[in-house]
Structure formats: structure tokens, C-alpha cells
Amino acid sequence: MFDGFLTFRPSCEVCGLDYDSFNSGDGPAFFVMSIVGIFVVGLALWMEITYEPPIWVHALVAGTLSIGLSLAMVRPLKGILAALQFTNKAEQGRFR
């Protein structure tokens, strides 16, 4: 389905489905930011209340988790949103 890290192939190698019509826009980024943000902030609050670590520990843990989880989640979410567009026959709005 993917040619690069986030770019779609022109079409499916097996069935020939054209991927040019799929446009997830900012959807994957929104969901990744929301999910990762809730998780990292919750973990930071728990860590502060439980252990009271220095600020550099918070920065190291939050930075590593934010970048790692974001990179791990953005590609599957883009694929899921493309699959939802296909199954729901979603199209771009047209002006008449």
C-alpha cells in the first residue's frame, strides 16, 4: 500500500485499485497527536506524583515517547483512514 514512509503507491500491486483518490489530509496527524498527547501527559503526571523526578527525566521520557509513538502510529492510522474512505465511498466535496 505504501511506497515510502507515508506516500501511497500509485495503485495496488494485487488488485489494481487506484490509490490516487485517497486523501486522508490531516486526519492521521490529529489522531496521533491526540492519542500520544493523552498518553504522554498522563504518564508525566503519574511519574511526577509517584517519583518526583528532575525535569531532565521528564524531558527525556516525554520526548522519547512522543517521537517514538508518533512515528509508530502515523503510518497505520493513515492506512486505516484510507481504508475507511474506500469502504464508505468517501469523496472530496464538489462545488456546483
Image (cartoon, rainbow, N blue to C red):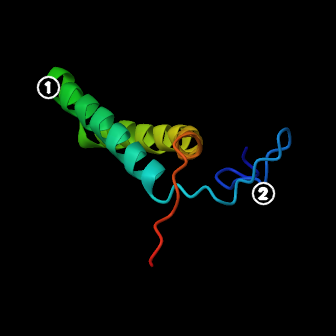
Distance from label 2 to label 1 (Cα)? 50 Å
Which one is in front, 39 or 87?
87
Q: Residues within 10 Å of mark 1 (few under 14, many from 20)?
A: few
Residue in view at x 72 percent, y 47 percent:
2
Give the side of residue 87 with respect to residue 28, left or right. right
Q: Residue 61: x, y in percent?
A: 37, 36
Residue drawn 28% across the image and 37% down it? 38
Residue 41 appears left or right of 95:
left
Q: Nearer the viewer, residue 59 or 86?
A: 86
Asked which quadrant contains residue 46, the reply is: top left
For the N terminus, the image quarter is top right
Secondary element at image label 1: helix
Q: Hey, which residue is sitting farthest top in the picture?
A: 50
* Residue tagged 1: 49
In-image side of 7 versus 43 (left or right): right
**Among the two numbered marks 2 and 1 on one chain, the one whose residue lies closer to the N terminus:** 2
Measured along the vertical axis of the image, is residue 76 above or below residue 27?
above
Could you tell me which quadrant the C terminus lies in?
A: bottom left
- In the image, what residue type sits under mark 1? Ile
Residue 95: image x %, image y %? Answer: 44, 77
Residue with the mark numbered 2: 10
Which residue is found at the position 52% from the left and 41% from the top?
Answer: 77
Horizontal and vertical percent for residue 30? Answer: 38, 51
Identify the residue at horizontal 23%, vertical 27% (top origin): 47
